[in-house]
Image (cartoon, helix red, strand yellow):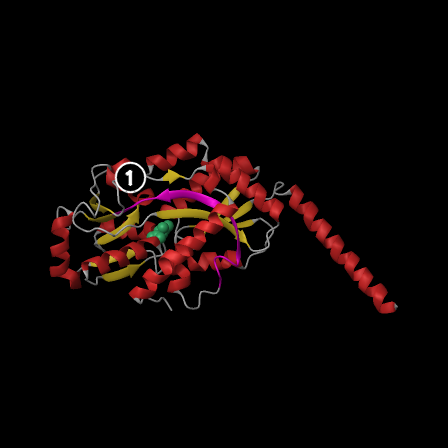
Amino acid sequence: MKRVAMNFAAALVVAGVGAFAGAQAQEYPGSKPVQAVVPFAAGGPTDKVARELTMIMSKHLGTTIVIENLGGAGGTIGAKKVAQAKNDGYTILIHHIGMSTAPALYRNLGFDPLKDFEMVGEVADVPMIMVGNKQLPPANFKDLLPYIKANASKLSLANAGIGSASHLCGLLFQSAIQTELTTVPYKGTAPALTDILGGQVNLMCDQTTNIAGQLKAGALKPYAAMQSRRVEAFKDIPTAAEQGMPGVEVKIWHAMYAPKGTPKPVIDKLSAALQKSVTDPTFRAKMAELGAEAVPAQRATPDSLRTFLGSEIAKWTPVIKKAGVYAD
Ligand code: ASP
């Protein structure tokens, strides 16, 4: 009897906690700031998309969203931190395609992108362009390829760590030209770009969101757009396929996640604010200016992201396994 009474009391406590959590979810976000982890260095492509987004999304969510840059290991350090964070809606992740390539690249990843996160929605698609520092002699992509073959041991290719977009693009490029270059990993492509401009590294495949300004200023050598059609904002840069290298195509997508178990009313509020933000004309114009494209509202939803992330994992896993590259 005593045990039954105790169990009943415990059940009441649990129910009470549940109701309390439910009430808290209804009041979310209140005035408490939300921390958005960006798993790359400040000033880089993921950071730029995240900053433009959170500036607008803070208004739609009704509280400030503060960015924490936690770069390293191709974005997996920041993602793991969010997977293990408190699931109360006050910690979120803004990541990119790396969320779908990491499971194949890291045998000891420490999190499962599909199982350890709640999906909020997609944010934007960003094209990639192969660039080099101004001192590189080849004037175009056609001249670059024989130059690389002849000087492979002296040339370096920057990236943001294994599993990053720049790494993935560089991997496809090296496999297409059947030549290995020395790769130099950074915590993000913002510091890598500084070294490209300074001539410490030679080449990088990067997102237009990072290099748009330097491309417009003529500070980099643009070699090829790494997608099937020319980039709208950089129509004068031919694609790799146009220059004799078909099949090297990487479109980067950004998305937002929360730790597994974040209450549904909270996810619904985050996703509603995200949908308002991606359709906000200011955000769309800013993305276009950087060569990127904000997703339509129907892609800024949990269901759409879950399906898309699953399809991207299915797409990249065999490509990476075939290349035989592992980060650990
Ligand atoms: N998005 C970049 C990459 O994966 C990293 C960054 O945002 O700095 O190469």
Classify residue 70 as left or right of residue 165: right
Query: Which quadrant of the figure contains the N terminus?
Result: bottom right
- Amino acid type, residue under disc 1 in the picture: Gly
User: In terms of secondary structure, where does tag 1 sit?
Assistant: helix
Classify residue 131 as left or right of residue 126: left
Tell me the quarter of the picture where residue 53 sits.
Answer: top left
What percent of the width, then of the height, locates residue 207? Answer: 31, 46
Does label 1 point to a residue whose CB lies under 8 Å from ligand 1?
Answer: no
Is residue 137 in view from this perspective? no
Does residue 127 show up magenta in the picture?
yes
What percent of the width, then of the height, locates residue 195? Answer: 26, 52
Q: Residue at x 29, y 44 (%)?
A: 211
Query: Which quadrant of the figure contains the C terminus?
Result: bottom left
Q: Nearer the viewer, residue 33 or 45?
A: 45
Does residue 130 show up magenta in the picture?
no
Q: Residue at x 42, y 35 (%)?
A: 283
Q: Residue furthest right?
A: 1
Is residue 50 in view from this perspective? yes
Above or below, 44 against 187 in this view is above
What percent of the width, then of the height, locates residue 183? Answer: 26, 61
What percent of the width, then of the height, locates residue 323? Answer: 29, 64
Give the magenta-colored segment's residue range: 111-129
The residue singled out by tag 1 in the image is 213
Tell me the quarter of the picture where residue 123 sits.
Answer: top left
Crowdedness near tag 1: few (<14), some (14–19) or many (≥20) residues, C-alpha within 10 Å: some
Q: Residue at x 29, y 39 (%)?
A: 213
Query: What is the tally of numbered marks visible in this picture?
Result: 1
Q: Nearer the viewer, residue 182 or 247?
A: 247
